[in-house]
Image (cartoon, coloured by chain):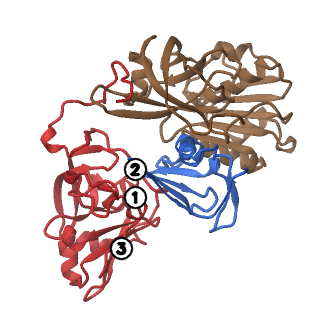
Chain colours: A blue, B brown, C red
């Protein structure tokens, strides 16, 4: 068991994501542009560096960058994010 | 699910404090205009010190949607910054900011008849307890099984309440600290494929699986479950991080 | 001002505030922050290279790197997430020594790492005794969680510039934003001027 692993689930950053997307986002699904697999955002892996990085649970590639600045969020999204209407 | 689109910070007041184990307490909260929640959801808690310093943590909601007050169970992390405040210092009447309910991914609302398998590491049992309380409150007939891993019997959260749960709920505990108490007839040691097989249900009945606890525990449990044949898409995980919530 | 939680305070309040940059709090822990999973690179596969706008590109294996003269430094470090840690002790190779071997032509560099992380810096900010490639912390080999086998150490800037799991420096003619610099964080990152974000 690798106890140096420090990620939590996308579900764990759901509060912040809901502030940004103004809707519940953890059940949205994302098709990875690296490996092609589709997984809910809640199952993605969330890492906290300076900001937050979400990674595909299958291949580890970056799904999103989320930086919380005092007056803005800065986002980078990769892959196809599917948000039900 | 119905909920306000933009989360805002609300002021929560501690109504009551309840000892659960030597290391954990439940805070019963008043939250004005609380919109309700689904079992499995969590809240973000924010504390502000007099000098403006802020700390924020996430805690699972332990109470059922049917309960009349919001309950959070906090386990004290010894060199933590927020949990020792909430377990040792904060008293009824004290306040903090709270945002939620949050999370649609790790939720059980009882709307499906599919069996559920709940796997908890330590204080990871909190959101799963919300699910079992919801199960009880709605008189659900869903086959629900809990496998809870704890260091010792003293560390088992909600022990009496879990003991009192009846069919179709089944509760299994594994104690990881040596030696187990005299007369102990439950499991011992870290969770394993054999243990999960003994608890069931079998993957063929396609249960929804919810695993919650520290990240290393959840990683291992999820790996075992998938290896046993559970469909990865039906295994929902909530990882606390390296040490805990 | 948000509502105060009676009796809540941060863990350590006995602070030499002249050592704290604005907006920072002292910690006695060493929080682990990361943009991704901890890479595991075996030492027999590890190399450190300096490439790009240099007179001679150069690479070192772990053995060659360990054979270079090293320095022990004790420095304060400052994370953009507001914690500062005083008197951290590291052993590593001074970047000046590495740059001498390559004779840079460009004025900027991008540090690149196992796991894909990057951070950009002016050459001037890793010269003149300001930066090291560190492989020991607190008297022990650098833990993978904290960037081991080796990380960049640039204590005068916010610690996201001290790239973990560093494998090389790519010298460039133009400044190229790295991982966080591309997503909201300040291109330079001086904690004493509180240069945390793009808007600062």
Q: Residues within 10 Å of mark 1 (few under 14, many from 20)?
A: many
The residue under the point 29% across, 25% down is B50
For the residues marked 1 and 2, what is the alpha-carbon distance in whole angstroms?
7 Å
Point out residue B11 in the picture as x, y percentages from the top left corner.
48, 23
Cα distance between the residues tagged 3 and 2: 21 Å
Which residue is more in the foreground, A85 or C84?
A85
Give how far across and how far down residue C175 sits, in percent: 31, 75
Q: Which residue is mark 3?
A: C176
Which one is nearer the viewer's eye here, C152 or A4? C152
Q: Earlier in the sequence, mark 1 or mark 3?
A: 3
Q: Is residue C175 left or right of residue A75?
A: left
Asked whether residue C72 appears in the rendered view, the answer is yes
Residue at label 1? C184
Say which chain tag 3 marks. C
Label 2 sits on residue: A69
Residue depicted at x 63% and y 51%: A41
Residue at figure coordinates x 61%, y 52% from the top left: A44
Q: Nearer the viewer, mark 3 or mark 2?
A: 2
Q: Gap in Å between the C-alphas at discs 1 and 3?
A: 14 Å
Q: Which mark is residue C136?
A: none
> Would residue C125 be found to the left or right of residue B86 on screen?
left
Chain of the residue under label 2 = A
Q: Nearer the viewer, mark 1 or mark 3?
A: 1
Residue B216 visible, this angle: no
Q: Tell me if B218 is positioned left or right of B81 in this view.
A: right
Question: Dot 3 lies on which element?
Answer: loop
Q: Residue B216's image quarter? A: top right
Is the C-beta separation of discs 1 and 2 under 8 Å? yes
Mark 2: few, some, or many residues within 10 Å (few <14, many ≥20)? some
Callout 3 and callout 2 share a chain: no
In this image, B49 relative to C40: left or right? Answer: left
The chain holding disc 1 is C
């Amino acid at each position: 068991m690798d106890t140096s692993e420090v990620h939590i689930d996308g579900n764990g950053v759901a509060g912040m994501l809901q502030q940004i997307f103004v809707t519940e986002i953890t059940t949205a699904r994302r098709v990875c542009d690296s490996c092609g697999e589709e997984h809910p955002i809640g199952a993605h892996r969330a890492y906290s560096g300076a900001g937050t990085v979400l990674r595909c649970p299958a291949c580890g590639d970056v799904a999103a960058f989320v930086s919380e600045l005092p007056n803005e969020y800065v986002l980078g999204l990769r892959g196809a994010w599917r948000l039900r209407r | 699910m119905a909920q306000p689109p933009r989360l805002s910070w609300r002021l929560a007041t501690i109504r009551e404090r309840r000892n659960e184990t030597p290391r954990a307490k439940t805070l019963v909260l008043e939250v004005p205009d609380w919109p309700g929640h689904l079992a499995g959801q969590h809240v973000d808690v924010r504390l502000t010190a007099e000098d403006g310093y802020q700390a924020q943590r996430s805690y699972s909601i332990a109470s059922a949607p049917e309960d009349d007050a919001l309950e959070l169970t906090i386990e004290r992390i010894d060199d933590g910054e927020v949990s020792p405040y909430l377990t040792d210092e904060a008293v009824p009447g004290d306040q903090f900011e709270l945002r939620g309910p949050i999370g649609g991914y790790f939720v059980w609302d009882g709307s499906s008849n599919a069996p559920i398998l709940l796997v908890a590491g330590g204080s990871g049992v909190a959101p799963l307890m919300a699910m079992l309380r919801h199960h009880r409150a709605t008189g659900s007939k869903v086959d629900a099984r809990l496998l809870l891993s704890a260091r010792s019997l003293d560390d088992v959260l909600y022990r009496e309440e879990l003991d009192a749960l009846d069919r179709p709920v089944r509760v299994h505990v594994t104690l990881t600290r040596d030696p187990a108490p005299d007369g102990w007839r439950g499991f011992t040691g870290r969770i394993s494929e054999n243990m999960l097989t003994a608890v069931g249900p079998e993957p063929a009945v396609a249960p929804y699986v919810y695993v919650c606890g520290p990240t290393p525990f959840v990683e291992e449990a999820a790996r075992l479950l998938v290896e046993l044949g559970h469909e990865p898409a039906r295994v929902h995980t909530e990882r606390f991080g390296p040490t805990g919530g | 001002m948000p509502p105060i939680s009676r009796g809540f305070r941060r863990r350590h309040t006995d602070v030499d505030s002249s050592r704290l940059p604005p907006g920072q709090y002292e910690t006695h822990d060493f929080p682990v922050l990361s943009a991704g999973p901890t890479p595991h690179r075996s030492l027999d596969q590890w190399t450190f290279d300096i490439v790009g706008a240099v007179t001679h590109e150069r690479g070192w294996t772990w053995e060659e790197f360990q054979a270079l003269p090293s320095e022990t430094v004790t420095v304060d470090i400052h994370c953009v997430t507001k914690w500062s840690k005083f008197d951290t002790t590291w052993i590593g190779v001074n970047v000046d020594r590495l740059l001498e071997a390559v004779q840079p032509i460009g004025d900027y560099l991008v540090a690149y790492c196992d796991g894909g992380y990057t951070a950009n810096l002016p050459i001037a900010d890793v010269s003149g005794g300001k930066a090291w490639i560190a492989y020991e912390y607190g008297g022990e080999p650098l833990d993978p969680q904290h960037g081991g086998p080796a990380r960049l150490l640039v204590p005068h800037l916010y610690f996201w510039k001290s790239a973990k799991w560093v494998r090389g420096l790519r010298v460039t003619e133009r400044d190229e934003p790295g991982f966080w610099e591309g997503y909201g964080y300040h291109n330079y990152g001086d904690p004493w001027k509180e240069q945390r974000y793009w808007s600062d």
